[in-house]
Image: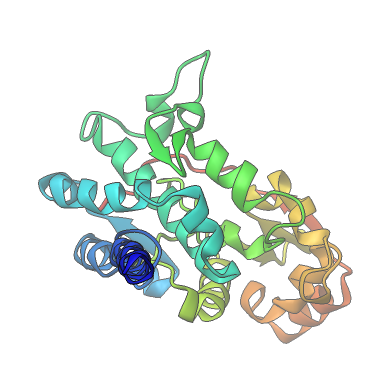
Amino acid sequence: MMRQWLGRMMAGAWLALVVALPATAADFDHDYRGLGDLLARHVRWTDEGVASQVDYAGFKRDAGQLQERLDALSAVTPGQFESFTRDQRLAFLINAYNGFTIALILTEYPNLDSIKDLGSFFRSPWKKSFFSLLGAPRTLDWIEHERIRAPGVFDEPRIHFVVNCASIGCPALRPEPMKAATLEAQLADSTRRFLSDHSRNRFDPSSGSLQVSKIFDWYGGDFAKGHLGINSLTEFFARHAEQLADDPQARARVRAGTVGIEFLDYDWSLNRAP
């Protein structure tokens, strides 16, 4: 009798554990359907698909829905996060960065012209601890530099083309969330779109140089770590000569690595829709 009772107790405890799992690891929506609905509604491609604009007024009207989506990210525990696959973790962190950046803009929108207006002389907006993630108060810098760019973790330089800082100079915010199932295609697509934007990356015939985003100055080292067999910025640009130059001779020079590199000024104006 005692053995049967213990058996029922153990079975009940196991059932309770299984029932509890969907609220944590088992049922996390890696398709980010709720966040995807908001992004599709309030972000649009512009300039023939090389840039995007964000309808912050629309996001402000849907601020309650956005907060629900961000609360779902904040509810993920460190243990649950570690149970994710590599691509699930990276997609999660990128979506968190972009989602909380939008939330930060909404704290003062429409009374700001740049994300930098939310900082001060003593603290940048990226160092503000205004949300919780993986069990503790966090900053945007923590997501980007201590998790996404942490040495030996992802080593994926193309994240710079999908992590969005709410600025015109930044690569486009996609009107969709990042997903593990499509992560490689999304990274490749955003890279192609950004390098095809000749307002921010181009071969200049008059100087014979590549004029590229300041991002490559700030984070050039990320493109020299052997990702996809690329060990320098010059090699990275050579791989993408088709996007950077229109003239065949110019493309040949970019591929040969015989061009100089100039870094353009960064436009910190808010990437708002008119």
Q: Nearer the viewer, residue 113 or 206?
A: 113
Q: Residue furthest top?
A: 122
What residue sits 69% from the left and 49% below the top?
150
Q: Nearer the viewer, residue 150 or 39?
A: 150
What residue sits 30% from the left and 53% below the top?
72
Q: Is residue 61 left or right of residue 260?
A: left
User: Residue 234 location in percent, x, y?
Assistant: 83, 65
User: Residue 79 location in percent, x, y?
Assistant: 51, 53
Image quarter of residue 157: bottom right
What residue sits 46% from the left and 39% below the top?
268
Position of residue 96 relative to residue 4, above or below, is above
Q: Is residue 58 left or right of residue 269?
A: left
Counting labels gives 0
Q: Residue furthest bottom?
A: 248
Position of residue 180 relative to residue 109, above or below, is below
Q: Is residue 264 left or right of residue 18?
A: right
Image quarter of residue 248: bottom right
Q: Is residue 171 in view?
A: yes
User: Residue 55 location in percent, x, y?
Assistant: 22, 53
